[in-house]
Image: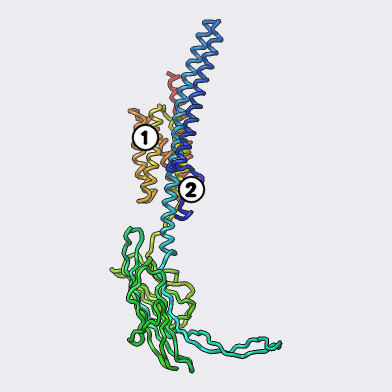
Amino acid sequence: MSESAQGIPGLPDLTHPSELMQFGTHLLKGSLLLVFLVFALGIAIALLSFALRQNQQQQEILIGEWAVSYSQLLRGLQHLTLVLVLLVGGFFLCSTLSNRYHHWEQAKVAQVAESVAGERLEQIAPQIRYMTEEPYAYTTQVNGKIVKVNEKRKISRFLTLSGSQIQVKIDQSPDVRGRRAIYKIDYTADYKVVNQLKDINSFFFEASPLIGYSLLQSYKVERDGTRLPQTNPGDYSFPFQLQPGQETSLRVTYKAQGSPRWVYSSNGQLLSNFRLLAIANFPGADFASGIIPNEIKNDRQGTQFTWLFDDNVSVKNPFGVYTYTDPVRHTGVLPRLLLLAPTIFFWWILLLYLSLPMSLTNVAIAGSVFFACLLSLTYLSRFINPQLGWTLISLVLLALTWGLGSKNRSVSLAALICTIAGTVLPVFGLLVPFSGLTLSLAGLLSVIWLAVRHWYGLYRLELEDRR
């Protein structure tokens, strides 16, 4: 697996045993420290009450005040501890989910990249090679003298193809695992050769087989209907004779299977009188390498791509057909949301504390529901749009939040407004492109609600004083 498909570096992931053990060790140490602080505070209060035992009346008053303060402190400490436990646990849960989702996104990106620019079936244009002699000179030393020697040597030259008429039929089927497709190729190509040389009549037709195939069968080369034999196994250089000024046709046919991308490469040659018809008998086919076909026909069975080059043309990149895959858009949105989720949860809990009486049970329920909704969003986003998924989850969240007010409608309404301003809008804002605007609206709504809540409370106190 490539390094890019790994999780986000530096973030804890509780699916790793070593990090899970480390988290448990730190949690145990933190719990022991909290217990020690509470125990030390109780001992301090007991020592103060013992020091004031000389004045019994003063002692009783102080002990009562300290007991009330200590009881309030314990209740506040319980709420603080529960909120901290939910924040810390939620952070590790969200960081784990963020790593897992980032891993899944990168795996999808790698899969799409592999289908577009990964393994491929590449057919290279054949070449017409011939041997010729050319003079060359070199110097050597004979009997202590520098002598210039003129000789001739044989070199390979290539003749340009006069025409190419290619037809390839491509069928697609899934592999055994069903993760990627397999192309089945039926290839037929007719090439025209004209001998424009005056003193050369021996040529070699070099028709390299398909590159990247997993199966190649029925490969044959014919000249004017007669099959040309291979001189050596694995040697795809076919000799033939052609007199000056004459024309001949060569045909290459084969069937192959391989990667889900087929391309044709000119191999640096100039193409002239060229026609390539690629028939893709499956949906989702598209042309590769950005070489736009001259004609594209769609029918029920698939798509036909036609490239026509009447005059000479140089094509730098291989061009052909691949299976189109929808790109993975907006990557990194869910991981960013999950990393910011504990902050959103803290803001929501703070709004709830400032708006309605919260018991330990309500805080525990609110925290569990919040992180359960994020967990559902993480896995639901793999199948549907994240914005739509959060809209559906928000309806469930609002319905459950209504119960925080028990049978008091005004308290339930307050919990509903806090949930919309503190959770629904911030999460939705991190899922849409206009995050800043949505988060600003959520913050403004929260401030307006707290201000209205405060003024309404002062108004009720003023009415009670008048009565």
The outermost residue toward the right is 144
The location of residue 291, given as percent across then percent down, is 44, 72
Helix, strand or loop at disc 2? loop
Check disc 1 and give the amino acid type: Thr
For residue 48, say whether it is visible: yes
- Left or right, 248 with respect to 136, comes to left
Q: Which mark is residue 70?
A: none
* The N terminus - image quarter: bottom left
- Of badges 2 and 1, nearer the viewer stands 2
Residue 384 sits above or below residue 185 on the image: above
Q: Relative to the observer, which residue lies in front, 350 or 242?
A: 242
Helix, strand or loop at disc 1? helix
Q: Residue 401 carries which label?
A: 1
Instruction: Give the residue number, with chain letter if any, for mark 2.
Output: 8
Q: Relative to the observer, which residue lies in front, 168 or 52?
A: 168
Residue 293 sits above or below residue 163 on the image: above
Check disc 2 and give the amino acid type: Ile
